[in-house]
Structure formats: structure tokens, C-alpha cells
Amino acid sequence: MKTEHDILIVGAGPAGMAAAVQLADLGFAPLVIDEQAMPGGQIWRASEGPRSDAVRRALGPEYAEGADRVARFRLSGVDYMPGTRLWHIEPGFQVFMSRDETAFSRRYRAVLLATGAQERPVPVPGWTLPGVMTVGAAQILLKTSAQIPEAPVWIAGSGPLPLLYMRQLLALGGQVAGFLDTTPKGQASRVLPHAMAALRGRGDLIKGVKWLRQLRATGLPWLRGVRDVQALGQDRIEAVRYTAADGRVHEQSAQVLLLHEGVVPSIHTTLAMNCEHDWSEAQGCFIPRTDERGMTSVDGLFLAGDGAGIGGALAAEERGRIAALGIAGRLGQDAPAAHLHAAHAGLARRLASRPVIDALYPPSEAQIPDETVICRCEELTAGDIRVAARLHRGGPNQVKAYTRCGMGPCQGRQCGYSVNRILSEEYGQSRAETGFFRIRPPLKPVTLGELAALEEGREAP
Amino acid sequence: MFKQLTDPKEPGFQVFVDGMAVSARPGDTVAAVLLRTPPHLARHTPVRESPRAPFCLMGVCFDCLATVDDQTSVQTCLVEARPGMRIERPRGKLKVAQ
Ligand code: FES
């Protein structure tokens, strides 16, 4: 592997792989780094892994596509460094990374962030108890380890992912104790009819409706209009409590509770680079601003994939190709305009059903109860944040300074949006006005040993 | 808490969780192994020493930190299990390097 590259791609998911393949086609030789051990991102995670036919069948055709994409990425011959964490980028781009407990730093002319999305944190009372996880986490366990919950599982939340996971779990003989559907009641009937009319023939939606029908037919306990979900227990979850649509409170024993309320772009790196971000009302999150070539407001820093707005794997690939063409142009090799047009047309097609999905599953706006832990690392509650917000009027950074909220190892990845929401409520201002934590390096914790290696100028593995 | 739908043909190997031999398979992350090994924990928090288990499995939450082959505060959901690996889930204060 070369040690010098003009282009760095961060992330080997759908966007990063598509960008790498496109750049290789254009004669460039980028370096791709990724935190995981194998390419594919979260959606196509462990696509190359060995698995039984039953697991392969349960994961479905969308997942199966991943194996082909990963193979194409491998074939492109692009330099790829798995198990590598990005922890700092300096303008110009001096990039700091760590691999195998060794830190190293290299220079690039262009950087493409294809770091994807994370699940939107769902702060409910008891969500830090062992036995409470995200739906995405459970699905990753299925992909990497063919691993499912031992006991019937409770699933609480909203969005396409719980439906997909339940389908996969049931196909493998797993059991669902209950699906606590927190989608506001009547949401589907409000959005679906006109969406279906507007988008008749759109494969994604038809598929979605078919799935819903199949899932309903399994007879799984599906409770609609649920709110106030709580995990109860001492050293682990013992029960789940929730308010049903009729207002009655129920408490039932639970071993595993999975939460999910959609996904949001990973914005820590773009925040650290001071890129412009816009608040998206439809997706309930901040989205870094990009131009028609996928470049952020920082010259030479590109963005592709769900990090540029949630659109799913196929949209991520189109964004990867767009950014690749943008980077090529920037490095003096303008691709034919038709290429860019084709990629944009592809992106528009892939995003066609997204507004309907966004409207179907709006992020929860319910007040977070005072006793709920907001910052999992520093163990601060919503009440702690409200007290701080009332004592000293200020933004997320002031709250961080007063309380340590967001200073733990996750650096605000789990509490950032909750703080934003609470302060916006407290001060009666918009989410955009409140803003997010200022993010400083290192983006991921770095050990002193790693830093020492950097100091000695030891070369990377 | 979780179980693996094992294919008997698939070869496995051993890792050691708090000194106890546990079986793992290629592709398993250390966090996945912890989630099927009682008491299904990764760590106790440095702040209030409350028990935590891997939560996000994608490198975001840092609740899966444990000691792997003497290296402390490893994000176990990002590390693949290897034959003979030693994983410790220390109680009490853990230092998180930053
Ligand atoms: S489980 Fe969240 S970082 Fe590992």
C-alpha cells in the first residue's frame, strides 16, 4: 500500500465504497479508512461473513446486494485500511488517525466524509440499564454474529427499522413480546393516502405497504399510539412500563427492550471543521450544507451518504458518485457533465419516497421526564440540564461547561440532541437557534500511548 | 441475554472473559460475545459505578468499553474477537483516556 494519497475517504459504507470505485474508474488512487474490520458500513455490515442459508434468507435481498458492492469495491484495488479511526482534521488537510494502537498523521488534497448516520438517541427513563439497546444494535448482532435475543423481545419506537428487524427476527424463530409503536396515532392514515396517490408505482412504498401487511398477518402484539415508555429495574431491565393509547398504564416483565426513533447524520466531524449546518424540520436533525458536487462549506471537504441527509443506502451510493466527480473536478480532472447529471437523476429517484417516510415517522416531541438520564457518560438527567439552563441562560456549550454534559467519551453523540431540545423548550426558541455543542478534537478518545507514537514519528502499519 | 444461531459446521475458537473460557466465531465482535456471556455487561461507569452493557454496537455510545488484552477502555463493538483474547470487565473506576 502507498503511504501517500491525494484523496482520503472516511468510511467504507455504501457512499464511501461507491465514491472509491468511481474515483478509481477516473484514474485516481484514494485511500479509504474505516472503523470497522470489514467494508459495507452498517447497512451491509459483515456482507462477506460466513452465514447459514436461514440467516441469509432472513436478512433479505437488500442486504444481499451488499456482498456484490463489497466485491466490486475490493476489485477496484483502492487502498483500504480497516480498523482505523479518524480523530482530527486540520485545515489544509492534515489528518490524524489511529490504527492498532498507533497514531499517525498524513496530508491530503481532498477529504470525503462518508461516515454515515447514527440512531437518534431515545432518552427514556431506564435506557441506561443493561438489557436496553437500540434496534440497530440488535440488527448488527444479527448481521455479524447471527445472534438474537434469547427471550421474547420488547421493541419500542417508530420508523422502518423496527419493522424490518421484527421481520428478520420472526423469520429466524425469534419472538416479539410486543411492539410498542410510538408513532402518533392516525399518522399513517393522514400521510399514506395522498402519498400513495402521488407516488403510485414507487417500488419503495409498495414494498413498505406489503411488509406492513405481512407483519400484521403474523399476529405479533402490536400496540399503536403508545407513549411514556420506561425501562424499570435495578442492575438490569426487569420490566417495561408504558401508557397505551387508551391512557392506561401497563407494566410487564422484560429481559430485552430495543429502542428506535429513526437515524440522524453523524455530524461530529463536520461540526469540528466548522462546516455550515442547517436544521431539517422534516428529519428533525442538523444536516451539513453541501453544494451540487457534495462539497461542504469548507473548501476541499466533501460529504456523501446519510451524513449528508438521511436517504438510505442507494441514495448514499449516488451521493458517493457525485462527490467523487466533484473531487475529480477539484483535482483538475472535470468529468463529463453527463456523469454528474446521471448521478443527480439517480439521487432524485432514490430520494423520491423519503418525504413520505419522514412524514410517516416524525421524531418525538414529547417532553423528556426530569428523571431521565440524558448524558449516558456523565449520568446527568434532563432535570440537571433544566436546572443549569435556568440558572445561567446560555447555549449548549455553557450547559456543557456547567454540568459536564457531553464531556464524556461519547462527546455528546448521545446527549447533543436532547440538550438542544430541552434548551429550545426552556427558552422558547427554535432548534436551529439553540444549535449543537461545539466539537473539539480529538473526535474519538486517543490514548497517551497512541500520541507518543505520533510524537516519535513512527510510521503507520 | 442473546443467543447465537450456530451453524454446527462453522468452526469456533475460545476467548477468555474474566478468565472464563467462552466460545466465539469468526466475525464476532467482542461486544457480541459479552452480550451472550452472563452477566451480559461490559463495564461499570466511572461516575456512579452503574452497570452498562453494549448499547449501540456501532461505535457511538462508548458503553461497551472493557479491557482487551490488557488495553483498557477498548470499544469492544469495534474489535473482532480473536483466538485466546483476554477480556476483562473490571468493577469500579475505569480510567477513560481522552
Ligand atoms: S456499543 Fe456503543 S460504542 Fe460500542
Image (spheres, coloured by chain):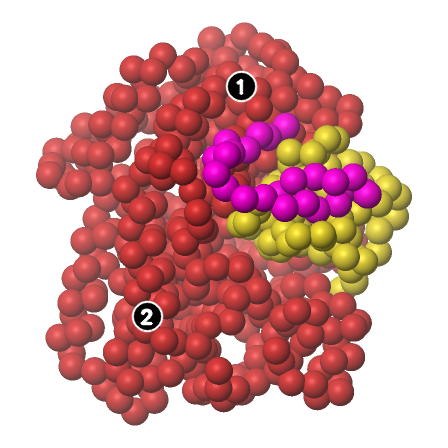
Chain colours: A red, B yellow
Seen from the viewer's position, the closer of residues A461 and A216 is A461
**Is A10 located above or below residue A212 in the figure?**
below
Which of the numbered marks, if any, corresponds to residue A152? 1
**Is A37 located above or below residue A161 in the figure?**
below
Residue A129 appears anywhere in the view: yes
User: Residue drawn at (44%, 77%), measured in percent from left and top?
Assistant: A79
Residue pointed to by mark 2: A75
Label 2 environment density (alpha carbons within 10 Å; few <14, some 14–19, many ≥20):
few
User: Residue drawn at (75%, 77%), measured in percent from left and top?
Assistant: A451
User: Residue drawn at (81%, 42%), measured in percent from left and top?
Assistant: B18
Using the rendered image, report if marks 2 and 1 lie on a common chain: yes
Splitting the image into 4 quarters, where does residue B52 fall? top right
Q: Chain of mark 2?
A: A
Of mark 2 and mark 1, the one earlier in the sequence is 2
Tell me which amino acid carries mark 1: Pro
A184 horizontally vs B10: left or right? left
